[in-house]
Image: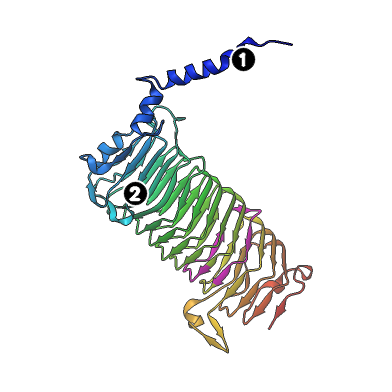
Amino acid sequence: MIRRPWLLLAPVLAVSLFALAFAPGSRAQNNASSGKLPGARPTINAADYPTLQAAFNALGDKGGCVRLPAGTFEIEEPLVLETEDVLISGEGTATHIVNANADGQPALVIRPKKHAEDAKAMLWRVQLANFRLTGNEKSGHGVEAIRVNEIFIDGVTVSYHGGDGIRLDRCYEDPRVVNSLITYNKQTGLSLLGCHDIVVAANQFEENKDALHCLDGFNLCMTGNNVDDHLGHGVVIENTYGSVVSGNMIEECNGVGIILDRDCYGITLSANVIAHEFAGGIELRDAHGCSVSANSFPLVWKRSIYVGPDSDRIAITGNAFSGSSIGGGQTKRPIAENHPGGIVLEGTSDITISGNNFSGLEMKALALEGAPSRRVSFTGNVLADAKSDHEKLEASETAGNLAE
């Protein structure tokens, strides 16, 4: 029989360790007696501080939570946050921060402490939630985040700023902007510069200059947003690839609903309603290998989709291009006042146009302009009360279309 004397000592050791852990003055005993959760950081109530900036400054290096009370709080210079793992949360629109600065300064700046000296410095995990932030035509951006990874903006109202509403500058990893109201800003509502793996969902954009810019990034997922009445364009995407814009309502922009430019590729524009745009629905200025599918284009002036000479390899399928017919020979709006149009091709190549419905158009269903377009397949489409240039294409490229 093998004897293991140390087994006899195990109960004694266990009792000794337990007694040591809960001896007077031990950390475990202190945490237990105080009723505090080990590792918990204190929640900062901004109402207990003389200014909002003082409350932000009270955050330790390990971050924490700042609770903003209900009330209207006027600021003359930017609030600055330089700490990561932080939640700034208010009481909904009852928490109203007003930027009274008239020198082009932003309302809220989030950035690493050494952002000016160290180009690689980053913050991680900052969340803004449930408050209202307004400015004036002489103020700067509403929220300006510089190199903040995994920034999360949820339920924030950002309005009336002289610059962009929200500007995310090289917030490279996983930025998310959801459930927010972004309105009446003099520049872009949401400006995404050098970001990737982006989620923009369930927001409302109204009467900014442009609604959204996504420049020099990739993997934008923009879905379920309402984009209305913009003074310029709706969505502008440049030098970006591998993205999807789907399920959005984009209406009555003075400019173009969606623009793809500067070497965009591999982007899908699908299941959007793009209505009554005054300068065009979708413009593919410099786009390649992109899909435009299952969108509705009611009453889009003159051209619902434009494919220019710097774009190629585009699939345009299953879309509805229409006037305002409601059946029985009735229309909601006079066609001559709205000039609805279909697709315009200019000097492009390798284009598939199939399974679309063109109806009640004043302009052409397909218009061929400028330099000749090559290798265009226009097949399986329905044309009702719509003229078209598709007959100018090669016969092999125009099979199976139905026209009144």
**Structural distance between the alpha carbons of marks 1 and 2:** 67 Å
Residue occupied by mark 1: 7
Residue 220 included in the magenta stretch of the image: no
Report the residue at 36% width, 44% height from top: 88
Whole-percent x, y for residue 306 in the image: 58, 63
Residue 60 shows in the view: no
Q: How many marks?
A: 2
Q: Earlier in the sequence, mark 1 or mark 2?
A: 1
Q: 162 above or below 56?
A: below
Task: Say the numbered circle drawn on residue 133.
Answer: none
Q: Nearer the viewer, mark 1 or mark 2?
A: 1
The residue tagged with tag 1: helix, strand or loop? helix
Whole-percent x, y for residue 230 in the image: 41, 63
The figure's colour scheme reads rainbow
Report the residue at 44% width, 30% height from top: 121
The residue tagged with tag 2: helix, strand or loop? loop
As shown in the figure, which amino acid type bears the numbered disc 1? Answer: Leu
Instruction: Please rate how many residues cluster around mark 1, counting C-alpha atoms within 10 Å: few if below 14, some from 14 to 19, many from 20.
Output: few
Left or right of 380? Residue 72 is left
Whole-percent x, y for residue 10 in the image: 57, 16
Instruction: Please rate how many residues cluster around mark 2, counting C-alpha atoms within 10 Å: few if below 14, some from 14 to 19, many from 20.
Output: many
Q: Nearer the viewer, residue 178 or 266?
A: 178
Task: Say the numbered circle drawn on residue 142.
Answer: 2
Instruction: Locate the N terminus by quadrant.
Output: top right
As shown in the figure, which amino acid type bears the numbered disc 2? Answer: Gly
Highlighted magenta segment, given as a residue range: 274-297
Q: Nearer the viewer, residue 364 or 118?
A: 118
Q: 160 above or below 398?
A: above
